[in-house]
Image (spheres, rainbow, N blue to C red):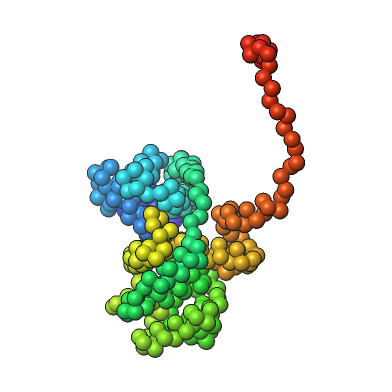
Amino acid sequence: MCPSPINTPERFAQLVQAFFCDYLIQQRDVSPRTVSTYRDTFRLLLSFLQQACGKRPEQLTFADLTAAQVLAFLRHLEEKRGNSVRTRNLRLAALRSFFRYAGACAGPELLAQTQRILAIPLKRFARPLLGFLSEQEMQALLQAMDHSWSGRRDHLLFLLMYNTGARVSEILSVRVQDVQREDYRAVQLRGKGRKERRVPLWKQTAQHIRAWLKRTGLKAEQPLLPNRFGGPMTRTAVQQRLRLHVQAAQATCPSLRHRRISPHTLRHATAMHLLQAGVAAPVIALWLGHEDPATTHQYIEADLLMKEKALRRLQPPKTKRARFKPRASLLDFLDKL
């Protein structure tokens, strides 16, 4: 299948295109979101190699993609672009997938090179405790929005995120028909790996959706939460709108000050409040669309209130410590140590 020689610009470009079109899309049928993530990784890599090797992307060959260059690229992501370790590991995972494919396709010619790259480990990192909003903070946020068109949309956006615990990508992909087909009692979400799930809605949420659709006249196939041009909102826009409303809510809820609050914080708030209400962890995992139920245990780790309740059930040991009496000679005591 693979012609020789392997180290030519044409062959490298050919394998990259086959990796995306044949392997990822045709054979594995990955989601468009996964394709976008891998595409962004290659864009960043090719741009980095252009500076490092002095070659345009169309001039690069496999000889330019050494393990040393991949390591330099990963350092560049962290030190120059300010990416987190999680993002660094995500980019490395995409490159590993490509080199496994290229190594299998090209045969022994790339074996040593691909093995060195596949041996680059994922970097370990500290997992901080999850941040979440209390019920009072969530209420203050929802009350901070005005009655303008964008204010009403944002109120429904964040109310729906809190109700469902949905990821940003999931909530932005919701169309009007995804709530209409459930008679406004639930919403159909499309999660990671094209997995779909239905989440029930509060009556209050359903009422806000009906009022919103009556005001906007959106059609069934349109996004439920569009931007001002009628298209779907972006993740960046959601982050910006959330930051704006958090600042407004600080006037009535000072605990929101000096905190880093992202759209994912609302998802954590949903999980924590379900957990504190006594909902079992496996049910929360299904609610949030966790592929691995063990992911839900993070919320148990972060819930200090539940730990304090558990501690109250555990009585401290009833022991008495003997009172310290100094020895006659401190030097004698030290000599015997």
Which residue does the image show at 58% across and 66% down from the upper left?
Answer: 274
Quadrant the C terminus occupies: top right
Left or right: 213, with 134 as reference point = left
Which residue does the image show at 32% across and 48% down from the upper left?
Answer: 81
Q: Position of residue 68 (x, y in %)?
A: 38, 38
Which residue does the image show at 38% across and 82% down from the upper left?
Answer: 222
Q: In this view, does 163 lie above or below 126?
A: below
Q: Is residue 27 visible?
A: no
Q: Where is residue 307 in the image (x, y as percent from the top left)?
A: 62, 53
Q: Where is residue 115 in the image (x, y as percent from the top left)?
A: 48, 42
Q: In which quarter of the image is residue 216?
A: bottom left
Q: 33 or 1, which lies in front?
A: 33
Q: In which quarter of the image is residue 226?
A: bottom left
Q: Position of residue 326 (x, y in %)?
A: 67, 19
Left or right: 108, with 284 as reference point = left
Q: In this view, does 114 lie above or below 281?
A: above
Q: 168 or 337, which lies in front?
A: 337
Q: Can residue 329 be seen in this view?
A: yes
Q: 68 or 9, which lies in front?
A: 68
Q: 95 or 207, which lies in front?
A: 207
Which residue does the image show at 62% across and 53% down from the upper left?
Answer: 308
Q: How many labels does the image show?
A: 0
Quadrant the N terminus occupies: bottom left
Left or right: 151, with 51 as reference point = right
